[in-house]
């Protein structure tokens, strides 16, 4: 399968790296010239269980290079920051053909509608992954994919051959993947995990090892998740999670103590976060359905304040 990972940061490189090792033609696209240059020069360094390995990869800053090298791709995996989704997908149009599938694995809610605006709803699949990655340096990541589940599905809940082919490719690469007929519920399940740890990691500046040693942080996480669950129920979303402490446990399962939530990674790089698409999505939907969300409102406010203090 010919695959483009659009937004090859830590998670994108982790997924793209293991798909490359499984024999697929994978292109890792990132706007950072230094990051792409490092991967072109020496390959992608992937650290797993403390051991680094080098994976030769195809990397680029521009999708036109992929088009010039061989036309459209079979699958675009979208992993750019939420606020870059439309711009990035428009730039990727040269590699989108008649049968290309565009699949978001981004954190938060609402990306599929944006993608559908650019390429048409027929081409879009939804997905959520519990896999993770940490950027150690240019072209150097910690891989957090082992045993971490990924769910994909058609927007209308149908079970299609194309979704099955993608799941098969992922599974053969060691990415535990299931095609779900209830992808909206799955997306909310994943949102709960992001709600549990993302903002709190960003606010405290703590990696998971230290974050999970603070009982007050765990209690705050459970309160934020409980609000999100109430919003989901009021919105008619069927969740598979029923205990507000379960997402807190799921978030760290199988990950090393030095793992950092993507929100913290963004802040450490001096970048804006995806808070508007995670806790902010809970707040907005809560307002629509009349469910109070004071804990999530506070977490959004704290992250917005930290973002305001970023240089530049």
Image: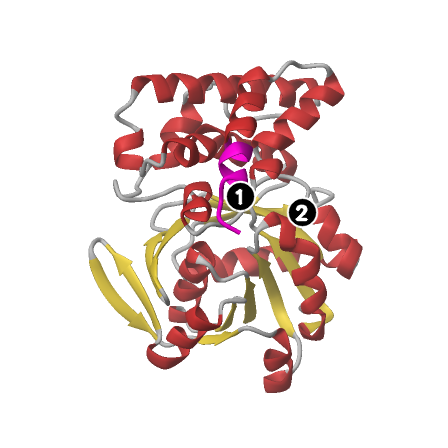
Residue at the left extreme, as displayed: 50
Find numbered disc 2 in the image and state the secondary structure of the residue it sits on: helix
Classify mark 2: residues with Cα within 10 Å, few (<14), some (14-19) or many (20+): many
Check the image and name the residue furthest to the bottom: 69
User: Residue 158 location in percent, x, y?
Assistant: 70, 46
Disc 1 marks which residue?
273
Q: Quadrant of residue 69?
A: bottom right
Q: Residue at x 74, y 18 (%)?
A: 289
The residue identified by callout 2 is 111
- Magenta highlight range: 303-312
Image x and y of residue 293, in percent: 60, 17
Say which label, 2 or 1, has the lower sequence index: 2
Element at label 1: loop
**Residue 141 coordinates in the image, percent (x, y):** 34, 59
Q: What colour scheme has been applied to the protein in the rendered image?
A: secondary structure
Residue 237 appears in the rendering: no
């Amino acid at each position: 399968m010919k695959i483009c990972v659009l937004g090859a940061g830590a998670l994108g490189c982790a997924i793209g790296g293991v798909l490359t090792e499984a024999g697929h033609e994978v292109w890792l696209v990132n706007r950072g010239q230094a990051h792409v240059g490092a991967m072109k020069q020496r390959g992608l360094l992937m650290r797993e269980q403390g051991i680094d390995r080098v994976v030769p990869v195809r990397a680029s800053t521009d999708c036109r290079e992929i088009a010039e090298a061989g036309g459209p791709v079979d699958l675009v995996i979208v992993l750019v920051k939420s606020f870059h989704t439309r711009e990035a997908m428009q730039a990727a149009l040269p590699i989108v053909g008649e049968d290309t599938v565009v699949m978001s694995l981004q954190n938060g809610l609402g990306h599929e509608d944006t993608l559908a605006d650019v390429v048409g709803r027929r081409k879009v699949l939804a997905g959520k992954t519990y896999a993770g990655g940490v950027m150690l340096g240019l072209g150097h990541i910690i891989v957090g994919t082992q045993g971490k589940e990924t769910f994909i599905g058609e927007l209308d809940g149908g079970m299609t051959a194309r979704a099955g082919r993608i799941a098969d490719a992922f599974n053969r690469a060691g990415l535990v993947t299931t095609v779900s007929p209830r992808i909206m519920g799955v997306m909310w399940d994943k949102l709960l995990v992001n709600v549990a740890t993302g903002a709190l990691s960003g606010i405290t500046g703590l990696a998971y090892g230290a974050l999970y040693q603070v009982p007050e942080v765990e209690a705050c996480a459970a309160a934020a998740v409980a609000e999100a669950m109430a919003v989901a129920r009021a919105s008619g979303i069927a969740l598979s999670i029923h205990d507000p402490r379960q997402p807190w446990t799921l978030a760290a399962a199988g990950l090393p103590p030095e793992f950092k939530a993507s929100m913290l990674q963004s802040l450490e790089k001096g970048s804006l976060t995806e808070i508007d698409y995670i806790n902010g999505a809970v707040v907005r939907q809560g307002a629509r359905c009349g469910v109070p969300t004071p804990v999530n409102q506070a977490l959004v406010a704290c992250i917005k304040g930290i973002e305001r203090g970023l240089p530049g």
